[in-house]
Image (tube, coloured by chain):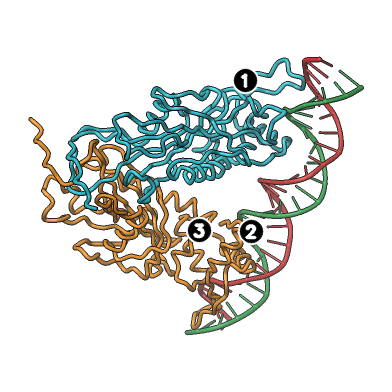
Chain colours: A cyan, B orange, C green, D red
Amino acid sequence: MKPTEPPIYKYSYKFPRPSVTVDCVVFGIDFRVSTPPRPTPYGELQVLLIQRGVESEAVPEEERAFVGAWALPGGFVEVSDGFGQGESLEAAAHRELAEEAGIKADYLEQLNTFGDPGRDPRGRVISVAYYALVRSMDHVAKAGSDAKHAEWYSLAPRMPLPALAFDHWAILEMALRRLQAKVRYEPVGFDLLPAKFTTFDLRMVYEAILQQPLEHRNFSRIVQRLKGDGILLTVGQERNVPHRPRNLYRFDKRAYKKAAREGFHFEL
Amino acid sequence: MKPTEPPIYKYSYKFPRPSVTVDCVVFGIDFRVSTPPRPTPYGELQVLLIQRGVESEAVPEEERAFVGAWALPGGFVEVSDGFGQGESLEAAAHRELAEEAGIKADYLEQLNTFGDPGRDPRGRVISVAYYALVRSMDHVAKAGSDAKHAEWYSLAPRMPLPALAFDHWAILEMALRRLQAKVRYEPVGFDLLPAKFTTFDLRMVYEAILQQPLEHRNFSRIVQRLKGDGILLTVGQERNVPHRPRNLYRFDKRAYKKAAREGFHFEL
DNA sequence: GCAAAAGTGTTATGTCTACACCCATGA
DNA sequence: TCATGGGTGTAGACATAACACTTTTGC
């Protein structure tokens, strides 16, 4: 079979070039399913997935991939024509999150770049993967501006995930491992919580991420220590609860950064 | 000024695409300058740089960038024509190291992807950065197959580095920070050492990377512990030295991986 | 009073650091 | 005998984990 001559498009180069995309692993925690009695002993870490639709009527059949499958939100990085600026990789990730899931991520960090030939059946596509932390309360699953379908899926052990498109399962796995490592020595857990939270909430976040129960008394001591260092501020108390009211705290990012510069080392 | 019409090349696409490169931060340690009396108290971590030459006579003047400047070794990822496979990102990194510096890296790991518009004056170039550890004894600085000039530069504090092309200084800085973090909880230091090494050599590697002196007695204890766990094997002794002979050790990668699977946690 | 969860006290255990000290070797 | 560096012992500081116990609230 003779290969057909490719059509001449507007953008032409001396050497072949790959497409470059960004894909985002968005983590959240749903407090609604996690307040006791909870289905799992340590809360519900969840990830946002998008159901791939018919990408566009203009896309020829043979160029569609994984239609109907679930995938990480993401898309092509905008590269400007000629000498204009285009967008940075991080900006592309933010844009795709807004477009596909209506999400504004407070925490976004690069994870890894996946570029094996063959990872995308449509051709050579190199994907820069990011992971994001959001307060999923604020982002109830909803479709983006186009006809895509967004849904939160639980990452609790034993909860089944749908098969993912491309190599997105590998990306998700790496992101989860990275998050589990990161949460131990950097205060990223707060980005999953509302501005005001209790020791209980914070512990739940850690249990959800690390997927193991933590001793509430020792955890309480850690919070007290952070309070002493001025990194957590008391901003009120719970009301009308059938137990001793919890203190409400706020994470003081500025105080943390100052302390970090002065050699303070966040742990667990 | 009216923009000139771009020439029609063979590879054309519907949307503009970026070039994708790999760049490698290659770390080594030179034992020759580090054996006492040493110029610095903690040895010499060094990095391999390439002097950019005239890239090719065929490259038009306005497309050359940073000619004569020092840069990290790297180059374009090969993307195959049509539906062939091309090379993986890691393979591209290995290939560039071989071509530009004649180096076979034992340890190579992805660092980060740099893709800000404007980072390369020639257009939109996205670079996947890797860092590598090599036994620099085995790789005396020498030019690669083409006319490029390769040189080891010291990273000891206060040693001046030449100005680097593109954003390579930012890449180098991130790589150094990553290496310093990694070396504390994963046994990567051994990839900088010859197969047989002494406690002294190993400590020097750690001092060079962390850029601070370590207590030789406590360090000795760490080595003994690794020996007890079967991760270091005694393979001989020094001869004809003006002091008590050091034991020679070999790192047993297989034993380490087995231990790691069983929950062993490497530290410092 | 009961249930629920916050928070404090305490103890055993382990780890890290600094340093004193002894050992082995070649010159 | 000296210089050089390997290796062991050890005491204090500090961190961690486990768990008993007290406190505070709504019902």
Looking at the image, which residue is at 27% across and 33% down? A86
The residue that mark 1 highlights is A235
Number of labels in the image equals: 3
Q: In this figure, which residue is indicated by the disc labeled 2?
A: B262
Q: Nearer the viewer, mark 2 or mark 3?
A: 2
Residues packed near mark 2 inside 10 Å, few (<14), some (14 to 19) or many (20 plus): few
Q: Are marks 3 and 1 in contact (CB under 8 Å)?
A: no
Label 2 to label 3: alpha-carbon separation: 32 Å
Q: Are marks 2 and 3 on the same chain?
A: yes
Residue at 41% of width from left, 24% of height from top?
A: A147
- Above or below, comparing residue B248 to residue A194 in the picture: below
Subunit under mark 2: B
Q: Quadrant of residue D7?
A: bottom right
Q: x, y percentage for residue B240?
A: 49, 83
Q: Secondary structure at mark 1?
A: strand
Mark sitting on residue B213: 3
Question: What is the x, y in percent for residue A151?
Answer: 51, 29
Three-letter amino acid code of the residue under disc 3:
Pro
- x, y percentage for residue B221? 62, 65
